[in-house]
């Protein structure tokens, strides 16, 4: 009996040590500031945390930078999305290759992390692809890619939008 108890105690101690190391790891990572969002990882929406390493969500623009582009009266595109939006999650992986193909800089603004911008830019649906001319929003495509039985846009609609506002000829 004593030998079995010793073996059980060893397993209990090993289990406690593993749990302590796991707890320490979680505490260390939750306090880290994420470079994309300039927020602690623990403060981010769970859906945003899942996208931190996704290559399709690496051109994040923060509110101060977006506001500066508007204030400086720049011409630019911006992709307004919500990290937990299923339409965004289906559209983004198809849109980003198009952006790369066309050589367009498309900053991505996560409305889930900065919800006051829904009203600021009159966004009713995500995703929204917007074009700003002289710092003023002049056009937008609101909604994602059409799926079977749903309304939305085709990848050619997105291509035409980019071409229309970047001065390129439609392909």
Image (cartoon, rainbow, N blue to C red):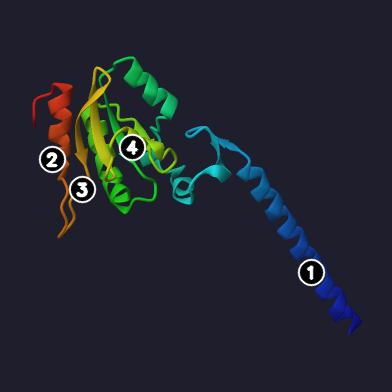
Q: Secondary structure at mark 1?
A: helix
**Mark 1 crowdedness (10 Å alpha carbons): few <14, some 14-19, many ≥20:** few
Q: Secondary structure at mark 4?
A: helix
Frontmost of labels 3 and 4 is 4
| Marks 3/4: CA–CA distance | 23 Å
Q: Is residue 134 above or below residue 97?
A: above
Q: Secondary structure at mark 3?
A: loop
| Marks 4/2: CA–CA distance | 28 Å
| Marks 1/3: CA–CA distance | 53 Å
Tell me the residue that label 3 is attached to.
Answer: 145
For the N terminus, the quadrant is bottom right
Tell me the residue that label 4 is attached to.
Answer: 119
In x, y percent, where is residue 167? Answer: 13, 21
In x, y percent, where is residue 168? Answer: 13, 23
115 or 42, nearer to the observer: 115
| Marks 1/2: CA–CA distance | 60 Å
Q: Is there a contact, CB below 8 Å, between mark 4 and mark 2?
A: no
**Mark 3 crowdedness (10 Å alpha carbons): few <14, some 14-19, many ≥20:** many
Frontmost of labels 4 and 2 is 4
Could you tell whether 137 is left or right of 115 in the image? Answer: left
Could you tell whether 77 is left or right of 59 in the image? Answer: left
Tell me the residue that label 1 is attached to.
Answer: 12
Q: Residue furthest left?
A: 170
Q: Is there a contact, CB below 8 Å, between mark 1 and mark 4?
A: no
Sequence-first tag of 4 and 2 = 4
Frontmost of labels 1 and 2 is 2
Tell me the residue that label 2 is attached to.
Answer: 156
């Amino acid at each position: 009996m004593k030998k079995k108890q010793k073996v059980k105690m060893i397993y209990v101690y090993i289990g406690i040590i593993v749990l302590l190391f796991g707890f320490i790891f979680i505490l260390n990572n939750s306090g880290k500031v994420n470079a994309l969002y300039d927020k602690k990882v623990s403060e981010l929406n769970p859906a945003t945390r899942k996208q931190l390493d996704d290559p399709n969500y690496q051109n994040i623009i923060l509110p101060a930078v977006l506001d500066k582009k508007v204030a400086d009266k720049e011409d630019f595109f911006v992709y307004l999305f919500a990290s937990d939006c299923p339409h965004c999650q289906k559209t983004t992986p198809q849109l980003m290759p198009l952006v790369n193909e066309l050589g367009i800089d498309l900053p991505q603004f996560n409305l889930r992390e900065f919800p006051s911008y829904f009203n600021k830019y009159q966004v009713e649906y995500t995703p929204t692809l917007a074009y700003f001319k002289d710092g003023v929003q002049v056009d937008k495509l609101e909604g994602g890619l059409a799926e079977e039985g749903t309304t939305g846009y085709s990848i050619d609609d997105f291509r035409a939008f980019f071409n229309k506002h970047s001065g390129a000829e439609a392909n």
